[in-house]
Amino acid sequence: MLEVFADPSLWAGLITLIVLELVLGIDNLVFIAILVEKLPGKDRDRARVIGLLLALLCRLLLLASLSWLVTLTQPLFTLYSHPFSARDLLLLLGGLFLLFKATTELNTRLEGQDHAQNQHNRGAKFWPVVAQIVVLDAIFSLDAVITAVGMVNQLPVMMTAVTIAILLMLLASKPLTRFVNRHPTIVILCLSFLLMIGFSLVAEGLGFVIPKGYLYAAIGFSIVIEAFNQLAQRNRRRALSAGRPLRQRTAETVLRLLRGEADHAELDPQSALLIADSDQHALFNRQERVMIARVLNFAQRHVNTIMTSRHDIEHINLDDDPAEIMARLDRNQHTRLLITDQGNELLGVVHAIDLLHQSLHHQSLDLRALIRQPLIFPERLTLLQALEQFRQARTHFAFVVDEFGSVEGVVTLSDLMETIAGNLPLEGEEIDARYDVQPQGEGRWIVNGNIPLEDLALYIRLPLDERRSYHTLAGLLMDTLQHIPEEGETLQVGSYLLRTLQVENHRVQKVEILQQPQDLDYEV
């Protein structure tokens, strides 16, 4: 027994086979790195481990069936004087599959669709991905197994070499996958490798053997060039960081966009490239990214999406009893008061500071004399235009009217600022509908029915129709159901289940949103 382990030829054969399996397994690792990207993040490691372990089992079965393996090289039929064996057919089919996958992936990325696809591709099926890893590994390793049979006579040595090689590939697959997905240029390079390998498999299946040395020389040369490219990018990043920080240049670009200076609002190509490559170390933290997104969305949102509905406005009627008016003034916590007449027609707004001045001068209460006229905004006015009108008019309050001139609600400068900075509640003030989102555990939320869909998108990504006429969650329910929802009524929107919890006076107050497991039907 010990003599077997002392045999130098055995160890030489084992090391040679391990190196051979690793060299020939590079293409397999590249394919795995591209393939597992289609899965959700939590499933990628599991798919990679299960796929490679099943591939190991497949290779061991191939080695255990040496007699069957020999028959794969025997001609099955002849076409145009060229004999085709089972091995040739396997190589031909595997090469065509690689060409198809590499071409489609290259087309997706070269057309700029990869980001949009990544938003949805987390729905690739788990087991089909694992099956592809196993099948392609069997095709890739076919030559290696046949070569191993010719190099070493001992079956245990061959199985040991294959097992060690697969375990080493398993250790290397995760960092390789992470590195490949982090660098877009490397992804393109790897897909080009797959094209070349697929072409060589098709050629070999047709009887035109391309020496493997040529392939590996081309791959090695390309890797050296890409290494130089990555080194150049790193040096460029250092040089740019030595001047004005990238954060400062990006912030200046955003400000120029807000000022309408589009001609000077572009980053230089080097800075843009660095931003594109900064996925690992995000340029801005999450809070900053949310705020920037809100600022850039200013020109797309309209005032009717952030206004306080007329039905939710607390007002003072001039025809009410003076004692009742004083009681309402005493309870009021706002700096501005809405004044209405007997027909509940909005007359204007009274500032609390004017009431204070009137009281300090020992004058009797006269709200009518203090009424000021606010700005009038059409409901489709953008937030950016509203901000400019607030600035020019030197007032912070406006009525929002529809196309018939009816007041639909009010909007203030504070509402605009909250759209950027988030909720800025006063002491004792109720939670604004725009921020009334209560997480109830993973995949479950209790949401105010009046929340604008643009604000809800910061928490939950509901699939929405861009041409919709509604702008609140309650509007989505009513438009889809075509009636006022009842308590307990449900609606399926994409992968989310919406359940109405509270309805008061024909208004949807509370809605429960449940994220359901997706039906993973996407192609890989």
Image (tube, grey):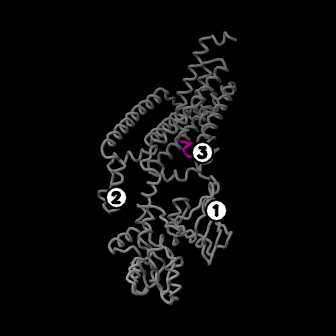
Q: Quadrant of the N terminus?
A: top right
Compared to residue 522, the image places residue 260 above or below, namely below
Q: Nearer the viewer, residue 127 or 72?
A: 127
Q: Nearer the viewer, mark 1 or mark 2?
A: 2
- Range of residues picked out in magenta: 34-41
Q: Which numbered disc, 2 or 3, marks the residue that appears first in the sequence?
A: 3
Q: Which numbered disc, 1 or 3, marks the residue that appears first in the sequence?
A: 3
List the residue tagged with mark 1.
497
Res. 255 mark: 2
Q: Residue at x 57, y 50 (%)?
A: 122
- Specify the principal SS of the magenta part: helix
Q: Amino acid at mark 2?
A: Leu
Looking at the rendered structure, the secondary structure element under dot 1 is: strand
Q: Residue at x 59, y 65 (%)?
A: 447
List the residue tagged with mark 3.
42
State the separation of the CA atoms marked 1 and 3: 23 Å
Q: Nearer the viewer, residue 349 or 15?
A: 349
